[in-house]
Amino acid sequence: MVIALQSSPASASLLPRICTGRRRLMISCEVALQSEAKPSSVSFKKGVAPSPDPTRIGSRVRVKAPVRVYHVPRVPELELGGMEGEVKQNLLFWRGKSLTANRPFRVEFVRDVEGRGLVKFVAHLEEDELEFV
C-alpha cells in the first residue's frame, strides 16, 4: 500500500483519493499548503474591538464581581470575589489574530487549601469582573 500526498490549491478537497492499479493500491491526499489571504470578520461583545495591551499580561488584578468556580481540586466551590491573582494570558489576540473569547483574561490564583497547602489554579474572567491593582 502506498500513500501519496500531493500539494494543491486551497480550494481542493481534504478527502483522500483511493486509486487502484493492477498490482498496488494508492491513496493520495490533497492538502492546502497556503491559506487564503482574506481576513476573517470578527465580532466582539458590545461591538467594540479592544486593542491589544501587552502591559496587562503579568499585572496583578483583584476580582470585583461575585464569581464562583467549581474546578479547584478538593474544594467543592470557591468564591473568587475579592481574591487577587496575576493575568497570565489575554485570549482576545492569539498569534496575531483576533478571537471572540467569552472570558478572555486567563488569571492565575494561589489559594491556601486546608490539608493541601498552597494550590495554584487558573480562571477565565471578563474585563468588567476585574480591577487592575
Image (cartoon, grey):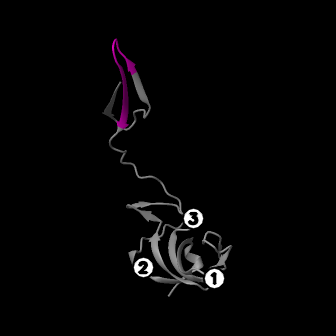
Residue at the spot x=48%, y=54% of the render? Answer: 41
- The kind of residue on which mark 1 rests is Gly
Q: Which residue is mark 2?
A: 58
For numbered disc 2, what is the local secondary structure?
loop
Gap between marks 3 and 1 measured at Cα:
19 Å
Residue that badge 1 annotates = 81
Q: Is residue 22 magenta?
A: yes
Query: Residue placed farthest to the front in the image?
Result: 115
Q: Position of residue 102 (x, y in %)?
A: 57, 64
Give me the residue at 42% from left, 32% from top: 13
Look at the image and say whether residue 24 sits in the magenta stretch.
yes
Magenta highlight range: 19-31
Query: Left or right of 132: which side holds 58?
Result: left
What residue would you read off at disc 3? 102
Query: Among all residues in the image, which is located at the extreme top?
Result: 22
Q: Quadrant of residue 24?
A: top left
Going by the numbered disc 2, the residue's amino acid type is: Gly
User: SS for tag 1?
Assistant: loop
Residue 1 appears at what percent x and percent y?
35, 24
Type of amino acid at the residue the image marks with label 3: Asn
Residue drawn at x 39%, y 79% is 55
Q: Residues within 10 Å of mark 1 (few under 14, many from 20)?
A: some
- The correct choice, above or below, for 126 with respect to 15 in the image is below
Of residues 4 and 129, which is closer to you in this image?
4
Say which residue appears at 36% left-offset and 32% top-offset: 30
